[in-house]
Image (tube, rainbow, N blue to C red):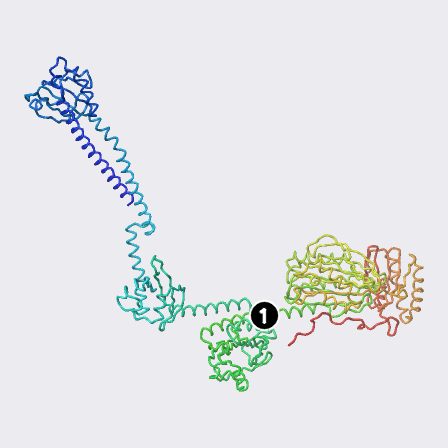
Amino acid sequence: MFMIQLVIVLLLAASAVAALVLQSRSEKTDAAFQRSLSAAEAFANAPGMLEALRSDDPTRVLQPLAEDARKGADLDFIVVLNEEGIRYTHPKTDRIGKEFVGTLDPVRRGETVTESLEGTLGPLHQVTVPIRDGDGEVVGMVCAGVTVRTVNLLLADELPLAVGAALVAVALVTGGTWLVSRRLLRQTRGLGPAEITRMYEHHDAVLHAVREGVLILDGDGRLTLVNEEAERLLQLPGEAAGRPVDELGLDRRTVRLLASDREATDEVHLWGDRLITVNHRLIHEGGDRPGTVTTLRDTTEMRVLSGQAEAAQRRLTLLYRASVAIGSTLDVRRTAEELTEVAVPDFASLVSVDLAQAVLRGEEAIGAEERVRRAAVGPAGAPHPLHPVGTSFRLEIDSEELAALRTGRTVLTADLAAEEWWRHGDEAFARRVLDAGLHSLITAPLVSRGVVVGMAGFWRGRNRPEPFDLDDLSLAEELAARTAVCVENARRYTREHDMTEALQRSLLPTEVPPQSAVEAESRYLPAQAGVGGDFFDVIPLSGARVALVVGDVVGHGLHSAVTMGLLRSAVHNFSALDLPTEDLLGRLDELAERGEEDGGGINPTGPIIGATCLYAIYDPVDGRCVLGRAGHLPPVLVHPDGSVEFPDLPAHPPLGVGGMPFETVTIELPEGARIALYTDGLVESRDRDIDDGLALLGQALAQAPPDPDRACDAVLDAMLPEHPTDDVALLIARTRRLAPDQVVEWEVPVDPSGVPAARTRVAAVMAGWGLDSVSFGTELIVTELVTNALRHGAGPIRVRLLRDRSLICEVYDNSGTSPHMRNASMTDEGGRGLFLVSRYAARWGTRHGRGGKVIWAEQRLPRGAPGRRDRSEGAGRPRGRGAAAPDA
């Protein structure tokens, strides 16, 4: 549009300039003719003209006069002619005397000729007049005029002004057009006529089709626009547009709102039986008062749908909370409590959970039982009229509702006062419930694998006045189903945990065996997350020695417990062979490695991987303790003065991943020193690294009482968190030494004569110890063992007698061969010595060392003998906090 208008303006300006030029040319030409005519007549009638024509040389007289007259009249030429048309004068003197170009006949007749032609000076305009004498005869002619070039020069002087004026006009018109176009573009958002027309059509369609009322009022309160929805909502009369709003029959509140200067956003008003959302805005149109635009939206149905959506969202939120909160622990009672915490107060005022007796005991429920026990009531700690936790109920089928519950169907009781089944014949209980304001109940069975394992009761009271409905029924079923699954998981875990713990405790020692080397006490605590594979042991060895063992199997559960039992049995078997510490660890490592290679052939639960072990042998005769470890933490030594030491033991990988020979360390322990063996659950936890745990353990042992039993309790109290995540085994042993008068040792010459001397020495020792009653048997044992060493061994040979809980005879020689008892025939001269030894000794055996072997034999001391103790004396009590039978 702008370009079209610009082209039109340019054409009009060009036309105007052309018209001005043509008009000016015409005027200039007419003026030139008039001036030429005046100059020609004035010169033709000038005094002396006739005399000059009649003179002998008219050119000499007239040429100067003609040039002066031409210049004075501002003409291009004034030419004087005779009657034949020969020039007497001319601006160009070479043209004088030549024939004149132009029309002369009319002039000879006395007429004046005005004409435009191509002359000697180019295109020109000229006027020719006659010269008359006194008689009126034409005696000559005068021609005056201007060239077309002179006229054009005159036009050129005026053309810039005309063109400039035209350009100014074009600029003004163009600028105005541009401003108008720009304003139109702003007002129409750059839309063309077709788009504007389509926009108005769409505007009308939307305005009258949308389900939102629109009213527009001008500054005088007159309704200028209203659509059908507004007419329907406000019930306006027909032809309401154009009328004042106060004449439309609306109530005063509505009129005040529509004409108000107060802006409103999403205000809800009640008009009749409908909820209307109102938005009110002012329109500033430049007048004294602004107009208003008001939109009305009927939100009655939307409010209903929104309420339903909010209720659904609340139910989904509650179910999500239940999925996260219920079943966070594998404890049956705690799972029931979590249901009460989730459902109160968002869903119910009170929640009760009753579970079958078998489920609470960890047993599998085989069907709906007649008796259940209340497991939880929530909210916890709040007063309520329901039966307390622990109350047992008998579910007698005397109503349809109870029958439905036992078959797994949920029962909705919207009005408690109008129903009887829930009272169970207990009117006092029913009266308490109703007096407390409880008015509605949903009873949902807890069904697991098709079996009803309990019931959940959801009660509503005064804080939730609306009764339960069908939507609440489905939500209660969802909560009950979730709880039933978690209860079953907790029951299974409890049963497996109890079985595994019972198995593990049956595999662990229940008391410290009788021995005199150490005073030992132990503790075992299973983790709440599951029983692990920690084990410990105190094993009496030959020669009054004792083995202290502690180990750990990676993992929790039945596999770890069984693996622990296998390792403990293997340790006992290898200890019975009197193997040195390094050999015993090597045998255990070989056992674990062979079990892994055989794919669990040795261990029916799978290969032994990641098991650790610490094995120590303490000799009370010299106080030496030989220690070795396979992937286990080092022991802690507490000296009699209270100082704490962590012995630096050679580190070896766990059992089954080594292959290298084990190394040991021998340390000497004074009497009264304490050695503590433990598993990593004691020193390592999620919020404490192992170095800090070891430092804390050393501090706790230093401050613990000397008594091992009290020391175990003090260490556990100082080290363990409230809920340990790993099982813990702790063994504390306080060392003892045999008195010098309890040990007699001498060297026997490597000669048969040494045998009688040995018998004599034994008899003297027995007499000194007051053991004359067993002297003969001891002499016979020493005789046979020394004779065997002389015949089959190598010197030196030593004999050592120990008086402890039993009488121990030991014969050492430098040979590695071991004697074997065999059946001697009637004709054999030898081979009956070991039979005699086994007859008089309670037990006998051989242990090997680095320098040879020791053949030993133990004899029971007679009653009343010095140093004798009953076998039960000194035996430890059952160990482990939490070892009592679980609460039924």
Q: State which quadrant residue 50 falls in.
A: top left
| Nearer the observer, 445 or 336 | 336
Where residue 337 appears, as percent x and y from the top left, is 57, 73
- Going by the numbered disc 1, the residue's amino acid type is Ala
In the rendered structure, the answer to whether residue 87 lies left or right of residue 442 reads: left
Which residue shows up at 47% across the image and 83% down it? 419
Q: Quadrant of the C terminus?
A: bottom right
Residue 87 visible in the snapshot:
yes
Q: Is residue 635 above or below residue 165?
A: below
| Nearer the observer, 51 or 415 | 51
Q: State which quadrant residue 207 falls in.
A: bottom left
Where residue 500 appears, as percent x and y from the top left, is 65, 68
Direction top: furthest residue: 56
Q: How many marks?
A: 1
What is the secondary structure assignment of the residue under circle 1?
Answer: helix
In the rendered structure, the answer to whether residue 763 lies left or right of residue 255 reads: right
**Would you call the spot at circle 1 few (<14 residues within 10 Å), some (14-19), or many (20 or more)?**
many
Direction front: furthest residue: 47
Where residue 183 appears, as percent x and y from the top left, is 33, 49
Q: Is residue 461 above or below residue 602?
A: below
In the rendered structure, the answer to whether residue 659 lies left or right of residue 762 reads: left
Where residue 634 appears, as percent x and y from the top left, is 75, 58
Residue 821 visible in the snapshot:
no
| Nearer the observer, 66 or 263 | 66
In the rendered structure, the answer to whether residue 838 lies left or right of residue 155 reads: right
Tag 1 residue = 490
Q: Is residue 130 above or below residue 688?
A: above
Q: State which quadrant residue 780 falls in.
A: bottom right
| Nearer the observer, 88 or 573 | 88
Q: Quadrant of the N terminus?
A: top left
